[in-house]
Image (cartoon, rainbow, N blue to C red):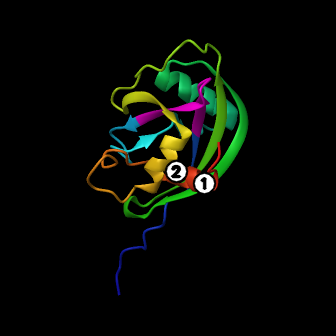
Amino acid sequence: MSTQPAQEAPNPRIGVAAIVRSEKGEVILGKRMGSHGSGSWALPGGHLEFGETYFACAERETLEETGLEVEALKLVTVTNDVFADLNKHYITLFVLCERKDAAKDPQVLEPEKCESWHWIGWDELRSWGAHQEDTTGPFADKKLFLPMIHLIQQSPEL
């Protein structure tokens, strides 16, 4: 019998992702770096801070990461994201947001966290989600962050 105490599982954390759409219906997607999910594509977002509303979090994270001022409009869906291999568990709240200045494009303001930002059509994003197992060919570099996969599964029409 082991004399070491059993390691307690960490508590789930709350993540907030901002769905920022263009007039064409495209969403801002960035390639993650330096954290879990590095190399995968995700929306702007981050951790909900103590006392913060999820709308305020979506607006803050979008501004910090992209330089875009947005208005949070509505909660779209919630996903349950377990990164078992990393012993991490997130509940992710997806918030639909609108740019305050439609002419402004996203900038990489946290280069240690995001390689680049791109506008991606929802149909194209869904096709990325359908090819997550592809290791060669056109979808090999289109791996989605786990919450994004769950978003597509739960909200096929956005």
Question: Is residue 25 in the magenta section?
Answer: yes
In the image, 101: left or right of 3?
right
In the image, 24: left or right of 139?
right
Q: Is residue 47 above or below residue 108?
A: below
Reading the image, the residue beneath label 1 is 79
Q: Are marks 2 and 1 in contact (CB under 8 Å)?
A: yes
Give the Cα separation between the discs numbered 2 and 1: 7 Å
Give x and y (percent) for residue 148.
51, 48
Reading the image, the residue beneath label 2 is 147
Residue at 36 percent across and 74 percent down: it is: 4
Give x and y (percent) for residue 127.
47, 49
User: Where is residue 54, by image quadrant?
Assistant: top right
Per the rendered image, the range of residues in magenta is 17-30
User: Where is residue 61, by image quadrant?
Assistant: top right
Residue at 43 percent across and 69 percent down: it is: 7
Q: Report the front residue among 111 and 107.
A: 107
Q: Quadrant of the N terminus?
A: bottom left
Q: Residues within 10 Å of mark 2 (few under 14, many from 20)?
A: many
Residue at 63 percent across and 45 percent down: it is: 93
Q: Outermost residue, bottom direction?
A: 1
Q: Is residue 123 above or below residue 103?
A: below
Give x and y (percent) for residue 36.
38, 48
- Specify which label sits upstream in the sequence, 2 or 1: 1
Q: Report the front residue among 95 and 153.
A: 153
Element on which disc 1 rests: strand
Majority secondary structure in the magenta region: strand
Element on which disc 2 rests: helix
